Amino acid sequence: MNCLLGPVAALLSLSLLCPATPAAAATPGTETSRSTFQSTQLQGDTRILHALNRFTFGPRPGDLEAVRSMGLDAWFESQLHPASLDLSDLNARLAQFPAMQLSTEDLLYRLPSNALLRQMTNRKLDAPQADLPYAIYTNQMERLQARREQQQQQNPSSASAPQEPVPPTTSAGSNGMGVDTATEQAENPTPMAKEPVPASGQDQMPGASPRGAPAPLPADASLLQSLVALSPQQRIAKLANMTQPDFDRFIQALRPQQRKALVADFTPEQKESVAALEGPERTVVEELIAQRLTRDIYSTAQLQEVMTDFWFNHFNVYLRKNEQMPYYLVSYERDTIRPLAMGKFEDLLEATAHSPAMLIYLDNATSIGPDSLAAQRAERAAWRNPGNQRKAPEGLNENYARELMELHTLGVNGGYTQADVTQVARILTGWTVDRPVRGGGFQFNPNRHEPGTKKVMGQKFKDHGELEGRELLHFLATRPATAQFLCHEMAVRFVADDPPQSLVDRMAKAYMASDGDIAQVLRTLFHSPEFWSTSVYRAKVKTPIEYVVSTVRASDAGVDNLRPVANALRQMGMPLYGCIPPTGYSWKSSDWVSTGSLVDRMNFALALAANRLPGIYADWAPQPQDEAPPSVRARSNEPIAREEARLESMLMPGGLSVSTRAALLQKFQQETASPQAISATSADNARAANAIERQDQLLAGLLLGSPDFQRR
């Protein structure tokens, strides 16, 4: 096919060209009335593409050929063992986000949360004395104070509950990631700090100029020029020594190219430091989202990333539960979810139950047994000092207990009662978090634990402290109802919105026989005839995360800035880590198909294809062996029918639905100039090449936004 575009042709071969059902064999028209046999199972390349679309975030150019060469079964087994795959390219990309490798405690120390800063203003903690960390702390504390004073002036009655300040809108030091802070601020207001006082008692950094009234700055261009002339370390020192108002004015006045020049030769750690001077907590959120998208787009261990997405959604934790949550989510996804995503479910269940992120999100960290030692002490203290205004300790909290049974294990029809929920909550009292503001880990507090024997679904649990809770988790993980619930959820994710019960039963049987081995359940699904049925081919509509990531992967775009991808997910209603209820996002088509959502997807596809997304570039230039030189194309005397024929040949009969092909062709005719028009308006080769490139971009955008591509 001589007229095929190289990258666009690859895109089509990945996701569009294979027919919805295997082609029937040719039959003699008059020799027999018997219907030709047509297999109900996917075959050949269609089978490979089906697996790639279900077990990855969408195939990239070359994936089809690679799996065909390797063998589909061998490829799937390799995906079940991610440690055996080459992740060197991914790891090099993840090196852009150094904070994502830190423990929660170290992360909070290096990039402090507002809650930690408030403790410092109350002199409960000392600020770091090194120049740069001190500047990070002081900048944010001054912003908090300025915001507080502003709110007091505007509305004195609001001083008791002021809002957190909005940091500068773009981070000069961000590692390819930005966040719409104004939107986040409006949706997720958080308490602001009390009046800050340098914890060390100093008025300025050691060796720094006074951080008092702003001094006049030279013109931004002059200052930038003088900074760029310095070494990276000297440049950071100068930025750190600025007063906070001066720093913010300078950073916000820079244009994108100037910002890029400011940090062009910085290491990832140095870029992160500059970003932290603008807003440490936001820097954590930016890197958390950026590393996740980087993994989804570039990881060769695609099944591991798909299952990480699946289990994070299953054990959902909301990013904005409180100011510590972004910090805890780093470890929650990295150390709890991803390593266990294809291991034993009981191990994963126990890891999430011990996670500070889960304990805080579902309030178990504050749960206290009604008859515990802590409750008794609180009762005696209240009786002795009836006028004491100190806040009484929390009582028994059933939030986690309820979701543990309803969402994490048994399912809503799993056979438990409200009395069982209460007993589970009693068993899990004392499961809390040590010093959460400072990033502490899991802690079992025996003083908060409810004493005595409990009974859940007919099973007795003796008073064994923390061991009591672990016995409960084992009990829940090994229930047949849990096997059915989990396997149905996986079948919805990988097969169909209403999966065949025969498939769910087979998967549940594998779960029970393997002690909840997730890899074995996936293997059973992969080898089941229901998964390969032609009736489920392209039967799933992609969720926003699946659509956006598959679009970037199929276009083979180079991504230096992940902000447009994150913003697209927010626009489509599926921001990463942004699901507030513990149910997580839905995998079903009905929740994502609407006129507005389809428009958002088409707009994203067209913007991506036309390279209008900052920091993302897709190359649609034709391959030399596939296309005539631009001058020949531009000066062709053939009418627009030539472009129609080119589009027809790319789509291939049977590749897309008739209605989709007709709509694409009509749109393409309306929005592209004919070769004759190009020849008439273009006097040189460059302009002709640009005109044809715009046609190719439009074609790619229409294909990526088509209804067929939105299915998997």
Image: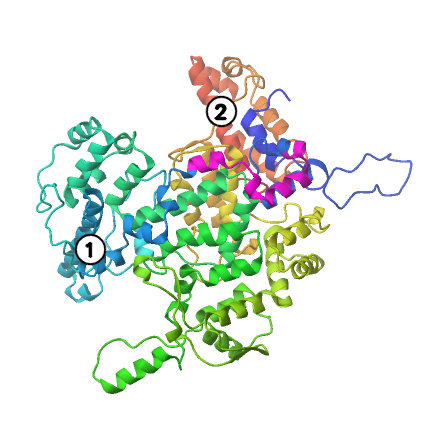
On the picture, is 410 further left or further right than 200? Answer: right
How many discs appear?
2
Task: Note whether residue 703 is visible.
Answer: yes
Cα–Cα span, label 2 and label 1? 67 Å
Q: Position of residue 608 (x, y in %)?
A: 45, 35
Quadrant location, the C terminus: top right
Residue under pointer 2: 673
Quadrant location, the N terminus: top right
Q: Position of residue 685 (x, y in %)?
A: 45, 13
Residue at x 14%, y 45% (from the top left corner): 205
Q: Position of residue 28 (x, y in %)?
A: 87, 34
Are there few (<14), some (14-19), or many (20+) residues within 10 Å of tag 1?
A: some
Residue 603 in the magenta stretch? The answer is no
On the picture, is 625 further left or further right than 503? Answer: left
Q: Nearer the viewer, residue 173 or 332?
A: 332
The amino acid on which the numbered mark 1 sits, given as a three-letter code, is Asp
Q: Which residues are magenta?
A: 67-93
Disc 1 is placed on an element classified as loop
Residue under pointer 1: 126
On the picture, is 290 further left or further right than 460? Answer: left
Residue at x 14%, y 56% (from the top left corner): 197
The amino acid on which the numbered mark 2 sits, given as a three-letter code, is Ala
